Image: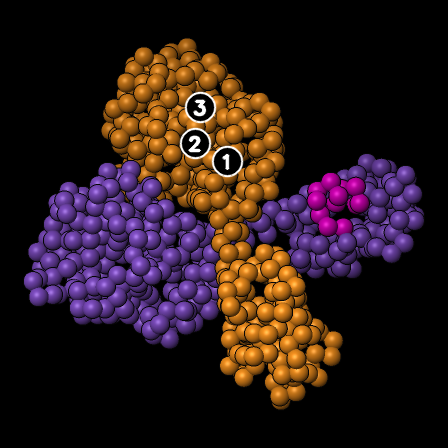
Chain colours: A orange, B purple
Amino acid sequence: MMKPVELRKNVWWLAHRSDSLLEVNVYLLCYPHEKGQANLMIDPGPPELLTYLQKAVLPITGGLDKIQAVLINHQDPDVAPNSAYIQKLNPQCMVVASEDTWRLIQFLGLKASRFKAVESYRNHRAIMPGGNRLIFVPSPFCHFRGAMMYYDERSRILFSGDLFGGLSYSHDLYATEASWEGIKTFHQLYMPSRDALKLAVSRIRNLDPQPEMIAPQHGSIIQGGLIKDFLDRMYNLEVGLDLLIAGEKKENYLGAVNEILNELEKEGSADALAKGIAALNRDRSFTSIMTFVGTRVTGFKVDPPIAVKILLEHLRTYGGTGLESLVNLVALKTLIGRNIPIGDILPQSGGEQDLPDYFE
Amino acid sequence: MMKPVELRKNVWWLAHRSDSLLEVNVYLLCYPHEKGQANLMIDPGPPELLTYLQKAVLPITGGLDKIQAVLINHQDPDVAPNSAYIQKLNPQCMVVASEDTWRLIQFLGLKASRFKAVESYRNHRAIMPGGNRLIFVPSPFCHFRGAMMYYDERSRILFSGDLFGGLSYSHDLYATEASWEGIKTFHQLYMPSRDALKLAVSRIRNLDPQPEMIAPQHGSIIQGGLIKDFLDRMYNLEVGLDLLIAGEKKENYLGAVNEILNELEKEGSADALAKGIAALNRDRSFTSIMTFVGTRVTGFKVDPPIAVKILLEHLRTYGGTGLESLVNLVALKTLIGRNIPIGDILPQSGGEQDLPDYFE
């Protein structure tokens, strides 16, 4: 347990650390005004932090019952649940979130009468005591549809929720170059696709003035020159489905190439096939594009369509007359059956003449 | 409140209806065996359902404390929280979910010692009392990364979580053709991209034997001929980011076309421009491809690149010599500045000759 850290005047990081890989950050924003002070909490976290939060805010606000509003990025159990307890302590406490998030956090037992949708604010911004603006920046599908970032114009800190969150390989408050690894892994795991990241990064780049800190809900806070650098890397990061689809694609090609080899083997070309592969293994052509165990392909070392194309070319050229007439026929059937584009793999011009039976 | 419905022998829909647009379905699976009966609950829902669930299961299992395992699709507040209460009632109750989901539902206060990751089961399946299998079918990013469907081989019911969930425009137990509208809207809102849907639908199509019912966590249960039909529609549905990106694209083209018109106006071609647009409005060319207010484009009626291309062609042809020399220059600058591919919009061959200054 650490003492709260004042990131900028009246903006607090509530500094809970559990030595886990997924550290939770809770932030407190105070806006002094003539009659007192408005206190906002961002992403108040899970119930297990409640006692800690009470102790942490006591010297700053006088207690959790002095929190007048809670801003929620999205509905996950590590982000939102304490908002219900804070609203029990201060029944007037407002909850601010997107409509999409509200549809789910209302199940925590929050009062509809004390909910304020960010969509209801003109131009997605609120004027805070002191005259500065709090700007609502949607980050759809980072990772939840209704994810909402909060930009405090006064301190120029962007509270980004899961976006720019990172696994904590180290537990530093401020990110260093070394923090990227944990950020990258976290995003590759939880973010659905690079489209979502590009959209959110573009919106951050459009903020005026630009943020001086990005404060995520997990991991370290990003500041200074790292902001531009990490924004650029994030814009080009492949994540979630991008990686899953690439993986599925590879598996599909692997299945296809082995199906082709099996069928050629069954068609009585086993000898020709074995000899061809053995010969090719000897001259190292194959070991540079794919790995074999016997006549079974176990992996690709280059882009799968290229590897399959080269293999088929070699089989046609060096497999003897027994194979030559069969390769395209068998490959065509297999590739079409697996929805693999044949244009990249099989010769196009005049290819039909080799396969009269198939098209009859 | 309705009575529980036995969908298939020993498989219960716990039949809670709240007349909301987002109805929550909870399911109970019972596996009788020599020494008694194993009871599994799927997605036990939010705390507000707890009392109802106790009443509903009482005649079937003898109470919630007789639930031996809870299977969780993902961590959302409408899906998972009651698992913590059930585990309080039966401290031996297992929680089964993906590792990715566990990382978040553990914040509900669940016991790590009673968690079983689906990834720890060989081949993603468990043998249930009676010998039938319960098959774990991942549906990554539908909508959460770690979303897990559960296929009860005995009843041939697939418990699909948010996938195939629907908004309840009607509150029928079984889906009809008319249910697609609510399913479509729900997915367009919550699912990140068609890639996620294609992946999940492919996995359902690969199940052997094929499911006879798809039982989602929201809305109506799908059965019979509708299964194949809805799978096909889902495979081709554009959702979430697909729609957002298309929307962003349209806004970008709208911004571009108005920027071009503004700049041409500022360049002293206001009269030519106004006359050109007026003439074109009269002959109805424009009203069929875009909508205008004065010289400002307010919307496209065809694909934006085509609309912009036709507008520029018309301006070059009918805008008089004052416009002719400026149109491509101004358009090129604007389109490149907005990352819009110029190949679809500007004439390619010989175009350079018209723009000597720009390329110097």
| Residue in the foreground of this view, choosing between B122 and B74 | B122
The residue that disc 1 covers is A181
Query: Which badge, 3 or 1, is on the more N-terminal residue?
Result: 3
Whether residue B348 is visible: yes
Residue B171 horizontal/vertical position (percent): 30, 61
The amino acid on which the numbered mark 3 sits, given as a three-letter code, is Asp
Q: Which residue is rendered at x = 37% and y = 75% of the image?
A: B225
Which stretch appears magenta?
Answer: B331-342
The residue that disc 2 covers is A169
Q: Quarter of the image holding residue B200? A: bottom left
Judging from the image, what secondary structure is the residue with disc 1 in?
helix
Q: Is residue B339 left or right of residue A119?
A: right
The residue that disc 3 covers is A172
The amino acid on which the numbered mark 1 sits, given as a three-letter code, is Glu
Q: Residues within 10 Å of mark 2 (few under 14, many from 20)?
A: some
Query: Distance of mark 2 from mark 1, alpha carbons?
Result: 8 Å
